[in-house]
Amino acid sequence: MSRSNDLGPSKEIRLPQGVVRYRERGTGRPVVFLHGLLVNGDLWRQVVPAVAADHRCITPDLPLGSHEVPLDPDADLSVPGLARLIADFLEALRLRDVVLVANDTGGALAQVVVTEHPERIGALVLTPCDAFDGFPPAIFRPLLWLARVPFLLRAFTRPLAVPALRRLPFAYGWLSKRPIERRYMDGFLEPFFANPAVFRDCVKVLRGVAPAYTLRAARKLARFEGPALLAWAAEDRLFPPAHARRLAAILPHARLEMIDDSYTFVSEDQPERLARLIGGFLAEPAGVATAALDQSSRATSR
């Protein structure tokens, strides 16, 4: 399987839930990039190099269906279990003052992490992601039902093995405006289809997804005192900009930036713009950033 070298060398770490593979590049304050279902860390391959010029960028392959190393069979892959896995990952690497950058399902998990395991988190960057009652978006809810009968899930997703069908809305068509390079798409899907243990992990994740978790996190996000950046796609068809505005109004020190000409995967459609936003956000002095973000949040919510 072809993997991007832009994220740095591949490493592995043993957690209570099993082995997690990750890649690391750069030095400085740690920035951890989280992806969503049926993609892996390669989603961030066009953003990390720019951010890694001044920061330590760490990109794990979460057990969301595109990971090459399955977790232990008894691993807890419920939403709280996945949030605990991320917290354990940060602890195992002894990371502090972490900047969490997240997309899609990873954004929902990031919200749970900062509300339930905030000890090592210093700042939050959310790109288009599940929030409130949209976990998952309506178009993907059949996957939750199908996961209860795994052979039906496999049959339903089998068309994704055909490259021409991957651009359909129920697949990846509404996630990126532009086609993703074939070798990376193959890398997203090959573990899911080829490794029964990876498929098992994905089924466990799908069975646990529910809006109760993002709604609960939303009620607690006001307690997060770190700066937050919401870099959202203005044309997103799955995660409405209205959710971004609501999140910006809840987070005490949040700034909302809209990204044009992009769908959910802003790291694919507008990687340079996203990298500049993240870099600028991280370059702000903490005290100045807090005041500026708070003012921006109030202006956005009006």
Image (cartoon, grey):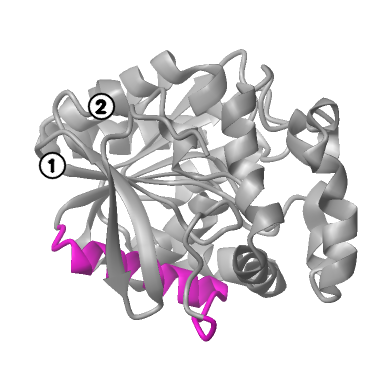
Residue for point 40% across, 78% down? 17
* Circle 1: residue type: Arg
Image: magenta residue range: 73-95
User: Residue 199 in the image: x percent, y percent?
Assistant: 67, 64
**Earlier sequence position, callout 2 versus callout 1:** 1
C-beta proximity under 8 Å, tags 2 and 1: no
Residue 29 — which label?
A: 1
Of residues 163 and 80, the one nearer the viewer is 163
Above or below, comparing residue 11 to residue 275 in the picture:
below
* Residue at x-position 73% and y-position 35%: 172
Examine the structure image and report whether residue 23 is included in the region drawn in magenta: no
In 3D space, how far apart are the residues under numbered discs 2 and 1 (Cα atoms)? 11 Å
In terms of image quadrants, where is residue 112? bottom left
Q: Nearer the viewer, residue 108 or 40?
A: 40
Please state the horizontal and vertical placement of residue 213, each as a whole percent of the image.
58, 70
In front: 136, or 285?
136
Along the line of sight, the residue nearer the viewer: 131 or 270 = 270
Q: Quadrant of residue 20?
A: bottom left
Where does label 2 land, which residue? Answer: 51
Element assignment for label 1? loop
